[in-house]
């Protein structure tokens, strides 16, 4: 169950990271509110997940999910570059996430 909570926490991390762009420096009220809600949800789910998972593993996976998702959505939503090297390094992060999950007890 903790891995599911951690995955959800990572999805909320993506949401608040993307929300930062839409909040325009916290000047837009609705995107700002959504960003804050997603941030709180992400932290609460991460805190719950680390009750059962090692904090180092959970934190690395949480940030990895956020980094991968935010990079992909940055490409899709904000025309950020999708170079082969950038996508390759995002792939390395995915390998790290999968590896941490595979070796965790």
Image: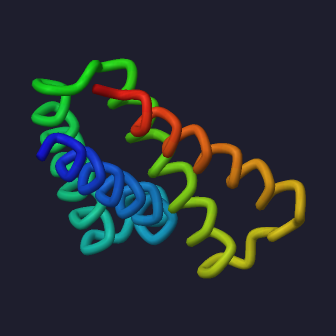
Task: Please state the horizontal and vertical placement of residue 1, each as a whole percent of the image.
Answer: 12, 46
Left or right relative to 64: residue 57: left
Left or right relative to 64: residue 34: left
Which quadrant of the structure image shows residue 11?
Answer: bottom left
Image quadrant holding the C terminus, namely top left
The residue at the point 46 percent across, 51 percent down is 66
Left or right relative to 80: residue 33: left
Left or right relative to 83: residue 26: left
The residue at the point 38 percent across, 19 percent down is 56
Task: Please state the horizontal and vertical placement of residue 63, each as a whole percent of the image.
Answer: 46, 39
Which quadrant of the structure image shows residue 84?
Answer: bottom right
Q: Residue furthest right?
A: 84
The residue at the point 70 percent across, 45 percent down is 92
The residue at the point 46 percent across, 50 percent down is 65
Vertical comparison of 103 with 79: above or below: above
Task: Please state the horizontal and vertical placement of residue 42, each as a whole percent of the image.
Answer: 24, 47
């Amino acid at each position: 169950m903790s891995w599911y909570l951690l995955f959800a926490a990572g999805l909320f991390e993506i949401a608040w990271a993307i929300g930062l762009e839409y909040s325009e420096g916290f000047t837009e009220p609705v995107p700002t509110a959504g960003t804050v809600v997603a941030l709180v949800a992400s932290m609460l789910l991460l805190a719950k997940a680390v009750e059962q998972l090692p904090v180092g593993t959970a934190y690395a996976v949480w940030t990895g999910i956020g980094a991968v998702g935010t990079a992909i959505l940055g490409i899709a939503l904000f025309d950020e570059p999708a170079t082969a090297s950038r996508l390759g390094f995002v792939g390395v992060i995915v390998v790290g996430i999968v590896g941490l999950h595979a070796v965790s007890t």
